Image: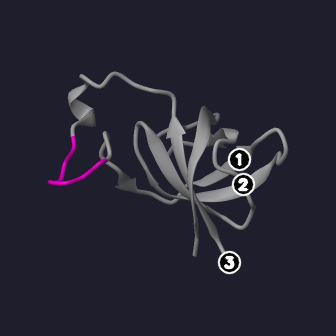
Amino acid sequence: MLLFLGLMAAPVDDTDPDLLTHAPGERRRAFRRKMAIPTRVDTKVRPQRFAMTQDISRTGALLATPSRFRIGEHAVLRFRSPDATTGYTRVEARIVRLEIN
């Protein structure tokens, strides 16, 4: 069983043209790209958990993980971005949706 986490990253500028919706009726502020990236998820209660991104945007991500989290938990994500040659990207986020698959 996998748990899908909807994450919201720090707010960004809503006037940025890259955040415009790309499909009629789409609620999201940013275009999401299907992308599988191994990701470390740390929360106060659950440090060093593993997840895999399902899709990602400038304002959020959907992650699949066997770990359990709670809506409203603050999380720190660490992953190597596909275009980076060294180091990891660190993102602070909040869990906004859970979906058991």
Residue type marked 2? Phe
Q: Relative to 85, is 71 on the left or the right?
A: right
Marks 3 and 1: which is nearer the front?
3
Rendered-image quadrant of the N terminus:
bottom right
| Residue 24 sits inside the magenta stretch | yes
Question: Which residue extends farthest front?
Answer: 71
Distance in Å between CA atoms under marks 1 and 2: 10 Å
Which secondary structure lies at badge 1? strand
Q: Which residues are magenta?
A: 21-27
Residue 25 occupies quadrant: bottom left
9 or 87, which is in the foreground? 9
Give the total of numbered labels: 3
Q: Relative to 54, is 68 on the left or the right?
A: right
**Residue 93: x %, y % from top left:** 59, 36
Ranked by sequence position, the earlier of labels 3 and 2 is 3
Residue type marked 1? Val
Q: Relative to 62, is 73 on the left or the right?
A: right
**Residue 45: x %, y % from top left:** 85, 44
Assess whether mark 2 and mark 1 are in contact (beta carbons under 8 angstroms): yes
Residue type marked 3? Met
Rendered-image quadrant of the C terminus:
bottom right
Q: For label 1, count other residues whose C-alpha is less than 10 Å away and answer few (under 14), some (14-19) or many (20+).
A: many
Residue beneath label 3, please?
1
In this rendering, is residue 47 above or below 34? above
Residue beneath label 2, please?
69
Question: Can you tell which mark lies on residue 7?
Answer: none
Residue beneath label 1, please?
41
Main SS class of the magenta portion in the image: loop
Marks 1 and 2: which is nearer the front?
2
